Image (cartoon, grey):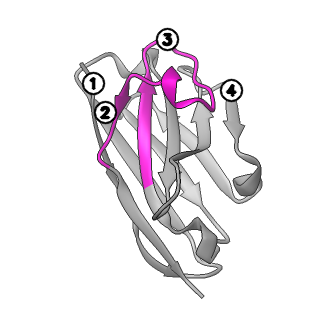
Amino acid sequence: QVHLVESGGGLVQAGGSLRLSCAASGRTFSGLAMGWFRQAPGKEREFVATISWSGGSTFYADPVKGRFTISRDNAKNTVYLQVNSLKPEDTAVYYCAAAVSGYGSRYRDSYDYWGQGTQVTVTS
């Protein structure tokens, strides 16, 4: 069992930045691939970014490439999502997810555990 808790969301103006965190507990964190997804009102949950168990491999959705950075600190059992140059269309609830296989993907079915989400609201 893995318990995930996101934090760091908030209200920010367009062009601003936030650092989202996801703290994991309950299982050896270093063996998990981690991902970030987001869900805007009335829309499907969509992939944002993923990082492999070692941190050596990352992958991003096209809309966030060059603006968002995923990273992890296995000593702190935490994965981060640095979100820069925010746009109103980035407004969503951001979820972190864990894959016990150690390798994430853009597909929700690859992930075994999910957090409760943190709200990011970007005003124009």
Q: Relative to 93, say whether 100 is above or below.
A: above
| Secondary structure beneath label 1 | loop
Horizontal and vertical percent position of residue 34 = 49, 30
- Quadrant in which the N terminus is drawn: top left
Q: Which mark is residue 24?
A: 2
Q: Kindly report the distance in space between the C-alpha atoms of the residues bearing marks 2 and 3.
A: 16 Å
Residue drawn at (61%, 41%) of the image: 49
Residue drawn at (67%, 71%) of the image: 85
Labelled pair 4, 3 in contact (Cβ < 8 Å): no
Residue drawn at (52%, 21%) of the image: 110
Q: Kindly report the distance in space between the C-alpha atoms of the residues bearing marks 1 and 3.
A: 13 Å
Q: Kindly report the distance in space between the C-alpha atoms of the residues bearing marks 2 and 4.
A: 19 Å
Q: Relative to 113, say whether 27 is above or below.
A: above
- Quadrant in which the C terminus is drawn: bottom right
Q: Which residue is mark 4?
A: 57
Q: Which mark is residue 101?
A: 3
